[in-house]
Image (tube, rainbow, N blue to C red):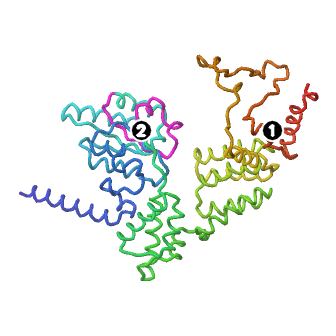
């Protein structure tokens, strides 16, 4: 009788501890979804009829790797799977788990399958932190199906996960939360905290979160506490600013377009210091680094073009660095690109040439491909006269022959006229040589 009383007391004590811990848990943990419909964002994975949702609902999940930036729901998805699966769910963190821990999980999974015919799901957070030996230890069990692996990583798995392990897993990429999803999450947080907030405060918290749902909720929790400290249930802009720990850079919708315009015009105007200032302004305000990189790639061809062909290579490299390295380190790559593009010789001749060619392409006319340029590789093409009269440039010692390459109505039109700036002066020399056969070697 005493033993039964002690057991009941222990259960009640454990339940009370669990309830108190749940109340004291961070807001982000308290708001973890318990249903697929509770997940914010990631519609491409868990929306109606989407692949990951179907696998979870039917409890037919095979090994997967969840790849995405912090705060996009990787752990929440794994915990939700734990709630609905009939399999045993085991969780390890690659930060502190060892090969011994992995082997113990495999031994337990083998016993569980043999004794109770129950499979095992292993959730391995920060899977990229496992070294090659640790990942290799997992491979046989994943390959045989003894373990269903759910690996979560913020790093590119193609670089950080062993190819044999990755090839046996389905890769699902989670995207940063957009503004609408982040605002929805913040409103849920306010409801849980029984608080309200001004639109200006929510906009600031959402912008600074930069797609990280956990960061948004953590900042909101601090802001609510600051508001409560002055006996107010409404979070203000000043509360949000204080919770973030930095002075906010005013950067609304209008400022966004104005700052981007100033950024582009500064680089076009060959002012590297101004370009760096506006870059820093955008980054401090939480502007999407991928948006900045895209603008640089466009500028490299629109405003520099053939005056410095390396400009596009540098801009593209910066854009790739944003994806591969991520912020904050990729700030340096963007800054290097800004300096290169700002100090490069400028030319908009490629842009103007394309616009002129597009005007001709839209103009009335047949636009017929000259017969000698038409495809002559298929049977019967020769009988149609396709390819007849075509001169193969490599057969000429100069590597070039004079022949028509456009429809007759636009043959004489000149679109691209190189500027005298940078490498484009060399391009102009080459074109001049080709247009004057007497000058060609």
The answer to whether 100 appears left or right of 69 in the picture is: left
Q: Is residue 34 above or below residue 63?
A: below
The answer to whether 172 appears left or right of 325 in the picture is: left
Where residue 280 appears, as percent x and y from the top left, is: 67, 61
Taking the spot 9% from the left edge, 56% from the top edge, the residue there is 4
For disc 1, the marked residue is 412
Q: Tell me the magenta residue range.
A: 144-169
Frontmost of labels 2 and 1 is: 1
The answer to whether 228 appears left or right of 308 in the picture is: left
Q: Residues within 10 Å of mark 1 (few under 14, many from 20)?
A: few
Quarter placement of the N terminus: bottom left
For disc 2, the marked residue is 98
Q: Residues within 10 Å of mark 2 (few under 14, many from 20)?
A: some
Where residue 13 appears, as percent x and y from the top left, is: 21, 62
Asked if one can make out residue 388 in the rendered structure from this viewpoint, the answer is: yes
Q: Is 283 included in the stretch rendered in magenta?
A: no
Name which quarter of the figure residue 284 lies in: bottom right
Q: Is 159 included in the stretch rendered in magenta?
A: yes
Q: Tally the numbered discs.
A: 2
**In front of the other: 23 or 3:** 23
Question: Disc 1 on helix, strand or loop?
Answer: loop
Q: Is residue 247 above or below residue 393?
A: below
């Amino acid at each position: 009788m005493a033993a039964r009383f002690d057991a009941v007391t222990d259960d009640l004590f454990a339940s009370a501890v669990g309830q108190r811990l749940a109340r004291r848990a961070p807001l982000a943990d308290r708001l973890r979804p318990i249903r697929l419909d509770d997940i914010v964002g990631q519609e491409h994975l868990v929306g109606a009829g989407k692949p990951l949702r179907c696998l979870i609902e039917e409890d037919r999940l095979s090994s997967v790797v969840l790849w995405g930036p912090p705060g996009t729901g990787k752990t929440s998805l794994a915990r939700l799977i734990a709630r609905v699966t009939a399999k045993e769910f085991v969780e390890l963190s690659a930060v502190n788990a060892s090969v011994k821990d992995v082997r113990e999980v495999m031994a337990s999974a083998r016993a569980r399958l043999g004794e109770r015919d129950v499979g095992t799901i292993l959730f391995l957070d920060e899977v990229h932190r496992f070294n090659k030996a640790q990942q290799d230890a997992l491979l046989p069990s994943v390959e045989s199906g003894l373990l269903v692996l759910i690996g979560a990583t913020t790093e590119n798995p193609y670089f950080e996960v062993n190819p044999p392990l990755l090839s046996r897993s389905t890769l699902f990429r989670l995207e940063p939360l957009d503004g609408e999803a982040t605002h929805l999450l913040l409103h849920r947080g306010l409801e849980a905290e029984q608080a309200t907030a001004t639109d200006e405060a929510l906009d600031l918290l959402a912008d600074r979160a930069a797609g990280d749902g956990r960061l948004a909720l953590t900042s909101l929790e601090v802001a609510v506490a600051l508001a409560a400290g002055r006996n107010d249930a409404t979070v203000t802009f000043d509360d949000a600013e204080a919770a973030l720990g930095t002075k906010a850079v005013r950067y609304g919708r209008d400022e966004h377009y104005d700052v981007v315009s100033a950024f582009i015009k500064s680089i076009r105007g060959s002012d590297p210091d101004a370009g760096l200032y506006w870059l820093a302004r955008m980054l401090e305000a939480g502007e999407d680094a991928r948006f900045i990189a895209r603008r640089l790639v466009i500028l490299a061809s629109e405003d520099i073009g053939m005056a410095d062909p390396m400009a596009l290579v540098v801009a593209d490299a910066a854009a790739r660095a944003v994806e591969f390295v991520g912020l904050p380190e990729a700030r340096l790559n963007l800054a290097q690109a800004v300096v290169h593009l700002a100090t490069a010789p400028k030319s908009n001749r490629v842009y103007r040439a394309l616009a002129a060619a597009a005007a001709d392409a839209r103009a009335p006319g047949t636009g017929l491909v000259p017969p000698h340029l038409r495809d002559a590789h298929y049977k019967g093409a020769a009988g149609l006269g396709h390819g007849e009269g075509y001169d193969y440039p490599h057969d000429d010692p100069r590597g070039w022959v004079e022949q028509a390459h456009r429809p007759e109505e636009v043959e004489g039109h000149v679109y691209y006229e190189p500027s005298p700036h940078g490498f484009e002066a060399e391009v102009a020399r080459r074109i001049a040589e080709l247009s004057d056969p007497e000058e060609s070697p």
